[in-house]
Image: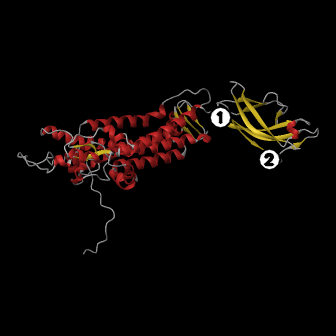
Amino acid sequence: MSDAPEQLYAPREPIFPKRVKGTFRSLKWWIMGITLGIYYLAPWIRWDRGPNLPDQAILVDMASRRFFFFWIEIWPHEFYFIAGLLIMAGLGLFLFTSAAGRVWCGYTCPQTVWTDLMILVERWIEGDRNARIRLQRQKWDGEKIRKRLIKFTSWMLIAVATGGAWVFYFADAPTLLVDLVTGQAHPLAYSTVLVLTLTTFFFGGIAREQICIYACPWPRIQAAMMDEDTITIAYREWRGEPRGRGKKRDDLGDCIDCNACVAVCPMGIDIRDGQQMECITCGLCIDACDEMMVKVGKERGLIDYLALKDESYERAGNQKIPVMKHLLRPRTILYTSLWTLVGVALTVALFARPKVDVTIRPVRNPTYVTLSDGSIRNTYDVGVRNRHGEEWPYYFTLTDGSALTVELEGTDKLVLVAPPDTEAKQRVYVVAPPGTEAAKLDRTDLRIWVVDGVTGDRAHLDTVFNGRGR
């Protein structure tokens, strides 16, 4: 028995995926192009919001504590919108995983997208799979050093662009770009670009599948989201086995054991060994296998998107279960319903937001003050949030017919001029003349109105007025 300590981490064997053509490879190219295009170009889209407001369509304005997304503006007190979007993202991930396995990982995960980009650049510089394997085993000479320098430099440029694009979401992109180039940007911007550059270079270029296997928790969580109706990539063993090569194939299955599915797999696994944690269901093995089946005159689909329930049906000679029967089941319906419910609630909340946003806090110490003429005065701290990019007037009134009067501290007028893009605080006094019901009663319902001095939009604040009591 060996005394050597047990290895908890298997040494990495470099994986060099082979180039493949097919439906799913084309789909991955399109998704990679669209997602990278959105990521790199979105900060440069302009959106006119009027004077004194940023014209960047998508902007996380940390200085003003706001988030802009085209015509939508989210303030800190409306963070529930962000929380709702995160909930929708989680439910969406549960839905797609329960329906089609790790399709998020295989097509749209940032780790997958940037790894695909890095491998594409590597293939352009070093050649396809066999050429890269030979270069890996080759001694360090002029050719190897030259190709590795070109590859690492290209990867670093991609990584710098990635880190640079991220910081553009937090400041005006054209201005920040000039500041970064001229050395005038804030140190936090440079440190953020540096960290994201190094992580992108390492994750997408060096670690690659190791991040998915060891760092990402989702492969271990996904099993709870999947069942026998989940559509994932599988090998039709009953059709392919026994595998083998040769002209006399009467006693052999359709699999010719060419290992094309293994050669193209970015995770380096053999899908014919069954379901594995490492599989990201990217579909490249399907493209490779279909290509070989066409060459040998066999039916496509030896490797395909299947549900585990399909196995027993197909082994018995039955047709494959319709996809919609797999998709429409209690688990997916529940996730879809919850996702829709949250989305509808956020949409309603977004369009139902008051145009005049106000808050009120009664001052309770003391609850009321008796003035020299016998009047009773209550004090309230009112906040008016000015979402405009310039000073904006707001007027205070009470419900028509009320015997009470309203006053503003520090001014004889009933108007508050709020500074731009901020919440203005105003102390408000409500006075009940002596002998009125409000002065005599212990508590009286009170409604204070705040009117936009430009648009005429109104909002009300419901509170109570405290009197002496009988």
Which dot marks residue 191? none
Q: Quadrant of residue 247?
A: top left
Q: Nearer the viewer, residue 115 or 376?
A: 376
Q: Secondary structure at mark 2?
A: loop
Q: Is there any visible trace of residue 289 in the rendered image?
A: yes
Q: Position of residue 457 (x, y in %)?
A: 68, 26
The residue that label 2 is drawn on is: 364
Q: Nearer the viewer, residue 402 or 421?
A: 402
Classify 10 Å Cα crowding around label 1: few (below 14), some (14-19), many (20 and above): some
Q: Position of residue 111 (x, y in %)?
A: 38, 46
Q: Residue furthest left?
A: 248
Q: Residue at x 58, y 31 (%)?
A: 351
Classify 10 Å Cα crowding around label 2: few (below 14), some (14-19), many (20 and above): few
Q: Secondary structure at mark 1?
A: loop
Q: Distance from label 1 to label 2 (Cα)?
A: 29 Å
Q: Quadrant of residue 429?
A: top right
Q: Position of residue 191 (x, y in %)?
A: 50, 48
Q: Nearer the viewer, residue 441 or 408?
A: 441
The mark nearer the N terminus, 1 or 2, is 2
Q: Residue at x 17, y 46 (%)?
A: 239
Compared with 272, 70 (above or below) is above
Q: Amino acid at mark 2?
A: Arg
In-image side of 17 versus 342 (left or right): left
Q: Is there any visible trace of residue 131 in the rendered image?
A: no
Q: Residue furthest top?
A: 455
Q: Nearer the viewer, residue 43 or 263?
A: 263
In-image side of 256 versus 458 (left or right): left
Q: Residue at x 75, y 39 (%)?
A: 463
The residue that label 1 is drawn on is: 421
Quarter of the image containing the C terminus?
top right
In-image side of 9 versus 373 (left or right): left
Quarter of the image containing the N terminus?
bottom left
